[in-house]
Amino acid sequence: MIKKTINQELMRTNNKAQILRCVKAKQVVSKRELTEELGLSTTTVSTFIRELEQENLILNSGIARSTGGRRSLLYQLNPDYCYTLGLDLQVDRIVGVLLDFKGDIKAEQEVAFQDRDEWKVVPLLKTFIHELLAAYEIPWSKLGGIGIGVPGVLNSEAETIDFAPNLGWKNVDLPAMLALDKPIYLENEANAGALGEVEYGLGRNVGHLAYISVGMGIGCGLIIDHKLFAGHLRNAGEFGHITVEPEGILCPCGNRGCWEVYASNAAALRMYAETTGNKQISFPEFLLKCQENDGHATNVLRTVTKYLGLGIASVINGLNPEMVIIGGKITNLKPLIFNSLLKEIKARALEKSFAGVRLEFSQLGNKAAALGMGSIVLAQITNALT
Ligand SMILES: [Zn+2]
């Protein structure tokens, strides 16, 4: 008897969760579509729709156009149910988006910083969070949670930052330092970027995606079979540290000749400094020089593109993805590098895998990771609700 009650309750929860997820996925859906899509009875769908409406999770958004039969009410998620913040902690700036419950972007902001000391950056992050909410006049009580993408390795519970080399952070308990009375979720920035592409970018409906985040290092976010692949210790995707030159330059990770030492933005700046003696140039300035056809910059770009392609070929050979998306400031140079990059990949990748992959440059600007973090929080909220 008790067992039966538990099963009934479980089925009830499942049905309600299914309806909520279906409304979320379809954005606007009629009662009839829900019935057909989920194979539930009209009575069951009506009961749960009423409950979800009473809980303010969904709202009626009109009537479906008649197709001969009875007209059917349309439903959508209530955008104002709650809001989430998706933040991307980069090495020189914080990028943030405010999402409503439907996942629509309500505000976006960024703030630059120079001092990377965690005791300077975390207070800035806290102020930024409040400012982003204020920009759209969202009361604190309406904030459902905060997701923060981090350029580094998290502990296995994804609760603290073990090591963020390019920020110089070690063992930083970011949620504790922020001390906010809201759920905070952390994720590696490349993983967050991959999720951002799946939810908002070119990776929609892509089941096997490698998102390659090219910054001062190189990180890869992997979507395998429509799911983020984090690895046994949440350390997967560190292709930036595969060896491409056995006797090569020492990498901050301790190995020699890592891919990111030859193909990252930091690599480009190092190579440019080696040939010109100019160590002061920033990466945006380097990009500008490339666009102006500066001889030294163009040579460096050629070398970096070659290494980028060689590493991507290995990613493709190892994972057989359906799509590879490159993210980071280097995407501004797409017209200059796309063909040579593709040529390099084609020359090195297995024919079958190359033929089946699409190479794309992110179209989300620098927001892929922030959007991914916002959607992680939304998914957590939806899962907890039902
Ligand atoms: Zn390394």
Image (cartoon, rainbow, N blue to C red):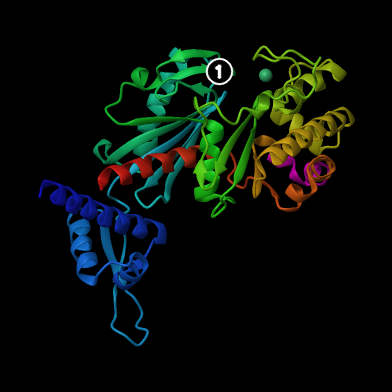
Q: Where's residue 282, x and y in %?
A: 70, 24
Secondary structure under badge 1?
loop
The residue that appears at 76% across and 29% down in the rendered structure is 286
Determine crowd level at label 1: few under 14, some 14-19, many 20+ residues with C-alpha closer than 10 A.
some
Q: Please provide percent x and percent y for residue 244.
A: 77, 25
Name the outermost residue toward the left: 1
User: Where does ligand 1 appear, by image quarter?
Assistant: top right
| Residue at image location 34% in from the left, 60% down from the top | 23
Q: Quadrant of residue 362?
A: top right
Q: Which residues are magenta?
A: 331-341
- Residue depicted at 84% across the width and 30% down the height: 303
Magenta stretch: includes residue 338: yes
Which residue reaches farthest right?
295
Q: Is residue 201 left or right of residue 18?
A: right
Q: Is residue 27 left or right of residue 342?
A: left
Residue tagged by mark 1?
167
Magenta span: chief secondary structure: helix
Residue in the picture at 82% in, 47% down: 339
Where residue 27 appears, x then y in whole percent?
Answer: 39, 60
Q: How many marks?
A: 1
**Residue 137 is at least partly visible in this image:** no
> Quarter of the image holding residue 373?
top left
Q: Nearer the viewer, residue 99 or 375?
A: 375
Q: Amino acid at mark 1?
A: Leu
